[in-house]
Image (cartoon, grey):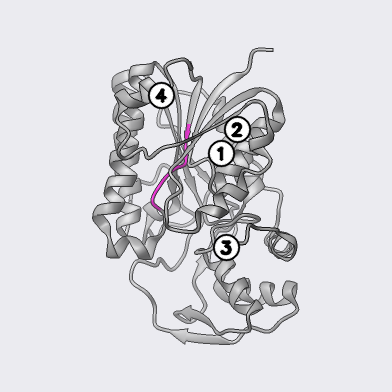
Amino acid sequence: MSRLKILVTGGAGFIGSHVVDVLLASGQYEVYCVDNFDSFYDPAIKINNQQQALKHPHYHFIELDLLVTTPSILLNVFKSVSFDAIIHLAAKAGVRPSIANAALYYDVNVKATLHLLEFARLAGIQQFLFASSSSIYGTNPNTPWNETDLLYKPISPYAATKLAAEEMGKVYAKLYNINFIILRLFTVYGPRQRPDLAIHQFYNLIKAKKPVTLFGDGSTKRDYTYISDLVSGITGALNYTGAGDNIFNLGNGKQITLLRMIRLLEESMQTKATINWQDEQPGDVSQTYADISKATEFLHYAPKVGFDEGIQQFVDWKEKVQLPAKAVY
């Protein structure tokens, strides 16, 4: 059987490892994963994320940093592989940390993406999926956010770098006939979620009976996307070859307040949280809200996991997850 060859960047991370597992389980793909084990969180977690994939005969892992790995080096590393598509998930993550180190976020999220686009051009790879972010909409008041609305109002360096990478990809699409598909991800959660993200942080604090710090008054809203739903959107985009501006929101199409999220965690954990209220933080938006009608029409995207169920599944995972002694989740 001839399997399609897919390059997944950031494939050992939260989202990437789930994408890799689903691709391998389908039996249709040979998956090549690159990751640099960024020190943003414990690399042992990423090793653990790959436990099943590393046993699979059609999984190949290469540790490398896309920022310092030039297109010519990539061509040499993969000289014997003819890729059918790239799924570019690698990025410097985090809205608040980007404010303190904007230059690093620019380098990783824009320059490294450019390296990968050049590699795609030189290697003749025509299918390129790019994981962007809902944060590019920023403070756009026109909710739910629609891909045709060009009122972008990012308020963090992270958001600005994602928008810049989108534009670079659009240029390559026009110049070199690359099918550059932009996937704007909305607050992804579920098993293996990064430990710096709110749901995961709050779980750990509540479990340890420590105060949970909330910024603002708890009324901020997020469109939360369960990991299996997100992966279905990514795999749906993998074979999409439509013309035009290929931009898709991948969210749930519903809003959940910060306080509601806390209450659901309390219910699932059967533990009351102690709240430490603080002023709003720079870079945080008051709401995110996805119009997912375009993804539904063209990618057959149909989120199935409600937020109550998703939180319970996350808590269940946390209760049973086994990690290496070194790892701190």
Report helix, strand or loop for mark 3: loop
Q: Is residue 177 left or right of residue 306?
A: left
Of residues 105 and 178, the one nearer the viewer is 105
The stretch of residues the image draws in magenta is 87-92
Q: Amino acid at mark 4?
A: Val
Residue topped by disc 1: 295
Q: Residues within 10 Å of mark 3 (few under 14, many from 20)?
A: some
Given the image, on which type of amino acid does mark 1 rest?
Ala
Alpha carbons under labels 3 and 4: distance apart: 43 Å
Query: Split into 4 quadrants, where in the image is the N terminus?
Result: top right
First reached walking from the N terminus: tag 2 or tag 3: 2
Q: Which mark is residue 77?
A: 4
Quadrant hosting residue 282: bottom left
Q: Nearer the viewer, residue 96 or 61?
A: 61
Label 4 vs label 1, nearer the camera: 4
Cβ–Cβ under 8 Å for marks 3 and 4: no
